[in-house]
Image (spheres, rainbow, N blue to C red):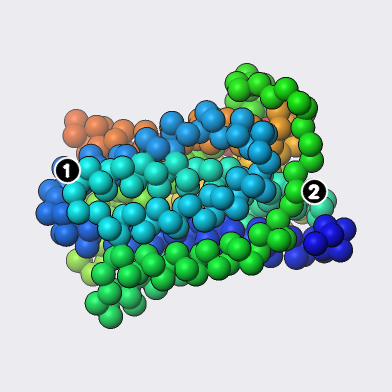
Amino acid sequence: MNSSTISPKTYRIAIAVFFFIAGLSFASWASRIPDIKRHLALSDGKLGLILFAMPIGTMLSLPFTGWVINKLGSRRVLIASALFYPTTLLMIGLVQEPWQLALALFSFGTFGNYSNISVNTQAIAVEEMYGKTIMASFHGIWSLAGFSGAALGTLIIAFGLNPFLHFSIIFFLAASLAIYFSRYTIRDQKTAAHTSFFNKPDRFILIYGLIAFGSMVCEGTMFDWSGVYFQKIVHAPVHFVTLGYLLFMGMMASGRFVSDRITQKVGIQKVLIASGICITSGLLIAVIFPYIITAGIGFMFVGLGVSSVVPLVYSAAGKSKTMSPGTALAAISSIGFIGFLMGPPLIGTIAEYSNLRWSFTIIAILGFSITVLASRVKWS
């Protein structure tokens, strides 16, 4: 198909579909964790140890991602990862031993990373066609897919389907979408013949990475500890324990769908500065007023705050003069993902010596680093 006959809107829809495939695949796995835990008779401790295989796969593949994308092109990597990512779900659905689950999750994390970097590289190319910031809307599609995957998982569980049958449905849906929309992905511009395996990030990429770090520390905290906070600090009734998480996720998804329009009016810097203030204010509200309504409002502020940060720094990185988009995104993801991994254990360590309210206060301070760092950069 002649790429000149394809409209920017068609490309945008196609790349949005690949974001949806990634979010749907991840949420489908997450919805079956309790069933797989029960099937393998895993204790909480053993499950936690095995789950760590997924981020290990992500972290170990990150240094290679930019190089692979430069060599093969983001289009090829995206199509391949969009097929292999849901294929790994089938492996997870077939596991009979804990080591098999660890191996499958390692692969899941690896292909998830290639999918993440390649689809964001494609999204940057679509942004260039539009000549304006539209990255947050793509990430909003990922969040929407997460809700869809969780809802579909709940429905499938209600019908009594086992994880393998569940994941088979997701695989055929994802593979069909990937194959059909692959024709509308963007062919990369040719890069230099010699591509260095390691490129030292410049000052701006490092700052973008640290901003992503501050946001992903907060995201990791909310994903893993929001329910515990509502249970132990807010003392919410059992049926309200997940309320904080739901409010956070709902506001994060909503924020991503309005972020692009706001950014186009006021600029990236003001949005990032406001995001850091929003995160810090929300966490402090939950710390100072640990009640269901006030903590819920606080968590909504946190969701709104983190919604725009990673999409906007990805968008800015795509304009780097010293690194290709794929390499720049891989560098930022490497720094940011450390924050995602560091947040939950940091919370637990601080809470062990004091309490969760102090832990969330420290995370609030890290969230404010987004405001400080964003104010020190001249954004184009």
The residue at the far bottom in this view is 159
* Picture coordinates of residue 59, whole percent (x, y): 44, 33
Quadrant hosting residue 158: bottom left
Q: Given the image, on which type of amino acid does mark 2 rest?
A: Glu
Q: Nearer the viewer, residue 17 or 377?
A: 17
Label number found at residue 46: 1
Q: Earlier in the sequence, mark 2 or mark 1?
A: 1
Quadrant hosting residue 361: top left
User: In the visual, does 197 lie left or right of 230?
Assistant: right
- The quarter of the picture where the N terminus appears is bottom right
Q: Nearer the viewer, residue 245 or 232?
A: 245
Q: Nearer the viewer, residue 348 or 277?
A: 348
Q: Which residue corresponds to mark 2?
A: 128
Helix, strand or loop under label 1: helix
What residue is at 26 percent from the left and 32 percent from the top? 350
Count neighbours of disc 1 (C-alpha within 10 A) and say few if under 14, some if 14 to 19, many if 20 or more. Answer: few
Quadrant hosting residue 90: bottom left
* Picture coordinates of residue 182, whole percent (x, y): 66, 59
User: In the visual, does 117 lie left or right of 285?
Assistant: right
- The quarter of the picture where the C terminus appears is top right
